[in-house]
Image (cartoon, helix red, strand yellow):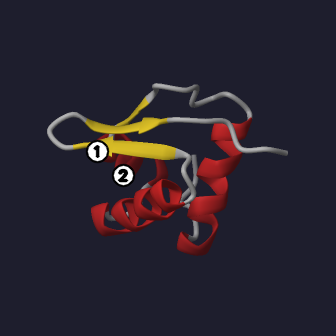
Amino acid sequence: MSRLIPIHFPRHFRRRIARGEYPPNYLLSETKLEQECMVARATVRKVTAALRAEGLIVTTPGMGSFVTAQPET
C-alpha cells in the first residue's frame, strides 16, 4: 500500500469501516495502522479521535479502540 496523504486518512478509514473491512468490535491497533498506512502515531491518534467523535469507534483504556458501527451510506 502506498503512503496515504494525511488529509485522506480519515476518509480512508470511514470507507473501510463502511465496506465491512473493519467490522463492529474490530480492534484498531495504532501500531498496525501506522505500519499499514505509513504515517506517524500522532496522525493515527488524530484520526481515531475524529472517528470516535463521529461515533464510529469507541476507545477503552488499556484495551484499545474498537469499531462500533457501520456508517450510513
Find disc 2 in the rendering and name its residue.
34
Q: 28 or 62: nearer the eye?
A: 62
Q: Position of residue 57 (x, y in %)?
A: 47, 44
Cα distance in 3D space between marks 1 and 2 = 5 Å
Residue 54 lies left or right of residue 41; in this view the side is right
Q: Position of residue 70 (x, y in %)?
A: 67, 36
Q: Residues within 10 Å of mark 1 (few under 14, many from 20)?
A: few
Residue 64 lies left or right of residue 55; in this view the side is left
The structure residue drawn at horizontal position 71% and vertical position 46%, both measured from the top left corner, is: 15
Residue 72 lies left or right of residue 45; in this view the side is right
Numbered mark located on residue 7 in the image: none
The structure residue drawn at horizontal position 53% and vertical position 59%, both measured from the top left corner, is: 3
Task: Using the image, determine if residue 65 lies above or below residue 12.
Answer: above
What's under tag 1, amino acid-wise? Thr
Image marks 1 and 2: residues in contact by CB distance under 8 Å: yes
Find disc 1 in the rendering and name its residue.
31
* Total marks in image: 2
| Quadrant in the rendering for residue 7 | bottom right
Q: Residue furthest right?
A: 73
Q: Residues within 10 Å of mark 2 (few under 14, many from 20)?
A: some
Q: 65 or 15: nearer the eye?
A: 65
Q: Secondary structure at mark 1?
A: helix
The structure residue drawn at horizontal position 21% and vertical position 34%, both measured from the top left corner, is: 63
The structure residue drawn at horizontal position 60% and vertical position 36%, both measured from the top left corner, is: 69
What's under tag 2, amino acid-wise? Glu
Q: Quadrant of the C terminus?
A: top right
Q: Position of residue 23 (x, y in %)?
A: 58, 26
